[in-house]
Amino acid sequence: MTQEIEIGMGKSGRMCYALDDVAIVPSRRTRDPQDVDTTWQVDAYQFGIPVIGAPMDSSMSPDTVIELGKLGGLGVLDLEGLWTRYEDPTPQLRMIAQARDDEATVLLQKLYAEPIKPELITARIKQIRDAGVTVAGALTPQRTQEFYSTVVDAGVDLFVIRGTAVSAEHISQSHEPLNLKKFIYELDVPVIVGGAGTYRAAMHLMRTGAAGVLVGAGGSAVSSSRTILGMHVPMATAIADIAAARKDYMEESDGRYVPVIVDGGLGTTGNFVKSFAMGADAVMMGSALARAYEAPGQGTHWGREATHKSLPRGRRVSLEQVGTMEQILTGPSTRADGSMNYIGALKRAMASTGYTNLRHFQDCPVIATPYGA
Amino acid sequence: MTQEIEIGMGKSGRMCYALDDVAIVPSRRTRDPQDVDTTWQVDAYQFGIPVIGAPMDSSMSPDTVIELGKLGGLGVLDLEGLWTRYEDPTPQLRMIAQARDDEATVLLQKLYAEPIKPELITARIKQIRDAGVTVAGALTPQRTQEFYSTVVDAGVDLFVIRGTAVSAEHISQSHEPLNLKKFIYELDVPVIVGGAGTYRAAMHLMRTGAAGVLVGAGGSAVSSSRTILGMHVPMATAIADIAAARKDYMEESDGRYVPVIVDGGLGTTGNFVKSFAMGADAVMMGSALARAYEAPGQGTHWGREATHKSLPRGRRVSLEQVGTMEQILTGPSTRADGSMNYIGALKRAMASTGYTNLRHFQDCPVIATPYGA
Amino acid sequence: MTQEIEIGMGKSGRMCYALDDVAIVPSRRTRDPQDVDTTWQVDAYQFGIPVIGAPMDSSMSPDTVIELGKLGGLGVLDLEGLWTRYEDPTPQLRMIAQARDDEATVLLQKLYAEPIKPELITARIKQIRDAGVTVAGALTPQRTQEFYSTVVDAGVDLFVIRGTAVSAEHISQSHEPLNLKKFIYELDVPVIVGGAGTYRAAMHLMRTGAAGVLVGAGGSAVSSSRTILGMHVPMATAIADIAAARKDYMEESDGRYVPVIVDGGLGTTGNFVKSFAMGADAVMMGSALARAYEAPGQGTHWGREATHKSLPRGRRVSLEQVGTMEQILTGPSTRADGSMNYIGALKRAMASTGYTNLRHFQDCPVIATPYGA
Amino acid sequence: MTQEIEIGMGKSGRMCYALDDVAIVPSRRTRDPQDVDTTWQVDAYQFGIPVIGAPMDSSMSPDTVIELGKLGGLGVLDLEGLWTRYEDPTPQLRMIAQARDDEATVLLQKLYAEPIKPELITARIKQIRDAGVTVAGALTPQRTQEFYSTVVDAGVDLFVIRGTAVSAEHISQSHEPLNLKKFIYELDVPVIVGGAGTYRAAMHLMRTGAAGVLVGAGGSAVSSSRTILGMHVPMATAIADIAAARKDYMEESDGRYVPVIVDGGLGTTGNFVKSFAMGADAVMMGSALARAYEAPGQGTHWGREATHKSLPRGRRVSLEQVGTMEQILTGPSTRADGSMNYIGALKRAMASTGYTNLRHFQDCPVIATPYGA
């Protein structure tokens, strides 16, 4: 039963929950963490760990994309980021890492005003492909028509279309918008698309033929999206809703299972765990991976929405670098703050609640508490 | 269904919500921000942006009233403020801006003890009228009878009556109170009046003939009103209730549409956006405009209730000046804290939820979350 | 309808509310603050303002009891405090005011270990009586039998019995407990008694013949009582419940109206206002009056439960001194933090919601908000 | 009635409460604190105070186990802690106490990598037994099979099996897991086992023959367990649920009463009190006893889950040392922060609500408040 509350006369709203509002509770049966399986797949691609590197310049460079692939995950390069705007973005990354807080936004706006070079898209993708890992690149819906053929020609395995709010039905008075259904149908490459925040938005994206759906607001930091646009996709509710869409769509499509991928805003291993218990198949990580020693952000983190020329929606933040990417993903952890050993935490939580694989763990009971922490 | 909760035996209260408690969520359809229309009108006056400058000395001087008008909004001068008490209030504004926190209240009490000069009312209004923008001035209910003819003679287009709690039925044992209905009926100029916090209060104000109704507690800072008087008008609920009154009144009046104007306490572009999704037609802004480089408050902000001689209800606060008034209203923004590009944020939010004009956006679905942030 | 929630299987609890959770909202009618009447009475004694000075050494000395009486309120001296233990407690008060935070509790324990002298009870009461104000003194239930005849012989108008949890039915294996009903019946002086936290506790106290009932936990700071004893009397709920008991008792007693007096924990003028809207007749103030320049605490405040020899339940806290007692009670206020002009705030709130006397204001509608502030 | 809320479509969760969310309220009858009885028993062992020292190296050494026993409680030594890894752990304890915050986790991981020596288990147990107090030692489920015979041979009175999530049905692909039912059945010594978080988990543990059940997540700090594993056992709900299991199991077993022991996360005397009102028989204390002058942690505190080699779930924290263990347990208290005189607070709370023994106090009514504090 949906909880509708009356906000005012004639205006009701559904009560929605964040991952901080829920938790898992162990019950009768327990298992060993080493007996837990964390594999998952999207289209024909299988992965050992349910982690996707978010297409953000602070965490995913060609090198870290390759490293993440070798660790069993999927790295996604932002094809509209610094790596396709600059031949060698090393100086730009250093400038961002060293900027003062109060000058960082303006610096980002300036650096991302540099045009995208198609030949750099080709070169970056080639570098990743040559390393032998699964190749994935991301564009925004706004620029997909402009660059997709370059991307496809360069040879990606998975195509990611990612924006703050991506719908199957975009209407424009000034240009012919991307027809997502036609685009996906004609493309040979499977497409992961989002962010979607509701059952309906996700269901429509699944019907366009999407190979996977991103849950969220395109990686916008939750607080910025709420503070600046008044928009909020509370994650626990959104994941469960979109998992319900996955189930209903599977029925209507005679069996196509479209993975639900949580896009951002998690922060801790605990919320990573809860995502799966709410119904997710994989998680797209931004800040978690930006904490790696080898992350290009060098102790800072930002999303592309923070670079918008007239309405930046996010900040460059400073993060403590806590370990190697491998340690962050699979340990050993040297800290007790939920920033390290994501897979170890997931396995232990699944074991403590008696589950052996991710698909079953989606049914794990959860509780709600009146406050987040 | 109204949510009544039992506070104690025999005492129930309705559960009410602030804008921080709600959010919009994008759903199936999206649009381009440039396809969004933000015009609105009150009586015969049409405006390009739904922004009214609150009659507060920290943000609205004759000069900034004019500037706001030229930017498409409506500036309102406080006709009981420093500009009608002092020939040139520049020294007083500087004193306030430079006062220490612990001496500011007493300074305000002293400076606002200076009598209002009718000839200054006339002069200020003339200056604004000569600039060619829509002219609006504000009085409190207490002093409307004393000064309204001076105001009308000076030539205003819109008359604003604004207090903490303005009712259609004020009762006094010591004087003949303002009969609002008679006053509005006999006045040639349309009157915007408030603050009102409930359906009933707003309905009665509409029935007096008000051209627009202010929602809130007359711009009193929310926290002060609650801390000092125990009074609180949670904005999300109040806007929806008063929007319901607008609809019912439109029916009973055979079609008169009385704009609902949110008066203060918003703080961020996100809450500005949510106001319209809850049912508002326009927003009266105080602190947001006090952040402009050209604001008379010079980095400080206060309301007139902070100047009360025996019960000040608000403080002079310090604000960071973030950009020009134009940048604050229409960008470009150089910050990601919700303090700049109000109209850009509104357009993007409307576009992301698929709406093209403000009247339709009033129907935008909202969600509630268990905590504000 | 009572809101019972299931905490766990077989264990439910009623949802209770603090004053911070509720607020008043102005509606249709408004009045002038000067038309508001704030008188009230207990037994045959009438007072101009509904303020009782809590029997605490930090705020009520013989001098401030007299001052409060002359301002229209009722001061109550703690007859087990420093004034009845020391001939001249000035040095002790100075020591407490000057103690470091980490040594204050032990100092209080030591100073209050000094025995009570009956002759000092007599002398203090005489001093107050000679000043011509209503005379009231407080004892705890534990020591009432020991000292009451001294108190009565000294000539009090009102007798206050005040403890953390006072019941009409105290059971002891080691001594004959105070039989409250018999005690009150035989005493010539009206007795105000509490704290009571529930309808049932208050109803029983009313049936003992109490002239007034204190709501709360005997002035224990809310947080200490909850932190240390796990005990909490959320004030909004408790006031409403006990106001309901007052009504039911009035019916069963054929018309005896027992005033409901809120005992402590309010903090601001806003919560003072809300107390009456929830059903109170008067408020017993501790920290508010300890902020006066002339308060014996000299910028510090503590309750007697903070002096307990083995389980202190409260701390000596530092408070800013904000004005004279007169300013704190009736203004003018020079601050906007809810610490000054209690009566002015009450009158303005009553006027803004259209009420002219306290008994009617008890019916003022309230709202609830999901968070305190 | 269980409160199920819809988190998202197809995913509901029960609303659960922490001890901070509830409180007790005094009602009609009161008693004297000295008339209150706090004895309880597990199996054949009776104790004067319902306090168990948690098997944590920061609070329980052989010496403090003995001291606690002499004070009427039950100390439990961690048989996998420093005292069974090092002949004399004094230098290790000093190193931990002196480590900087950012190096403490790695230090713990290193020190706890030292192997456990069976002969030290024997020696520690002998030392405690020789002192004449009840002897109890704790192992984790993982290592019970390895060490239990050493423990039993050394002569314990009570055996404690304690882990984050202990179930009656552990499944492993790599080894034969501990069959708890068979183990308990064959052992001569009564076994206390946990943590359990639900009715079902506890019921199954009772059916294995457990002499007592620990409620919680094995003493993991609540925040770490939630932050790192996404797992949370809100204590108020868990205690009530498991008390319900105790009642149902007593019926199905024809009268076996299995004490419910709250394991950790309480923090204050107030929450200690509330535990019993929710249904507990005793409380296992960690940080409270680590505040004693004589505690081995010397002003620091950690649990064994903080020493995990790949996924530490807890930190070494600094605590203020507030008094002797005796003062902490039975006063006199010199502070008003809920850190001293646990038994005094319990007795006073029971007296204020009219109860004379712990079993009756389990029925004490509680209230809920919308926020923790």
Image (cartoon, coloured by chain):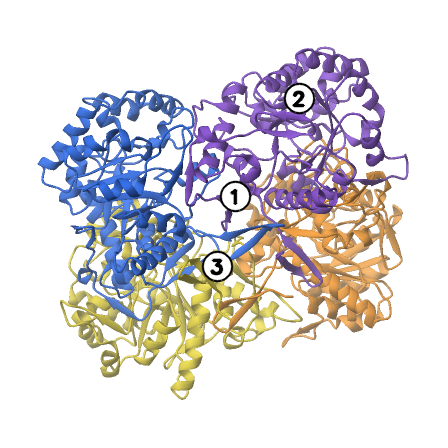
Chain colours: A orange, B yellow, C blue, D purple
Q: Residue at x 63, y 48 (%)?
A: A302
Mark 2 crowdedness (10 Å alpha carbons): few <14, some 14-19, many ≥20: many
| Local SS, label 1 | loop
Q: Which mark is residue B330?
A: none
How far separated are the C-alphas under marks 1 and 2?
A: 34 Å
From the image, state whether disc 3 or disc 2 is nearer to you: 3
Mark 3 crowdedness (10 Å alpha carbons): few <14, some 14-19, many ≥20: some
Mark 1 crowdedness (10 Å alpha carbons): few <14, some 14-19, many ≥20: many
Residue A54 can be seen in this image: no
Q: Which residue occupies the extreme bottom position in the image?
A: B254
Please, which chain is the residue tagged with disc 3 on?
Answer: C
Q: Which residue is disc 3 drawn over? A: C2
Q: Picture quarter containing residue B326?
A: bottom left
Q: Which residue is disc 2 drawn over? A: D57
Which residue type does callout 1 highlight? Cys
Please, which chain is the residue tagged with disc 1 on?
Answer: D
Q: Which residue is disc 1 drawn over? A: D364
Q: Eyeballing the image, is B373 above or below B182?
A: above
Q: Residue at x 52, y 21 (%)?
A: D321
Please, which chain is the residue tagged with disc 2 on?
Answer: D
Give the image location of residue A213, x and y in percent: 75, 61
Q: In the image shown, does B264 or A348 lie closer to the viewer?
A: A348
Which residue type does callout 3 highlight? Thr
How far separated are the C-alphas under marks 1 and 3?
A: 18 Å
From the image, state whether disc 1 or disc 3 is nearer to you: 1
Q: Is residue C363 left or right of residue D188?
A: left
| Residues at marks 3 and 2 on the same chain | no
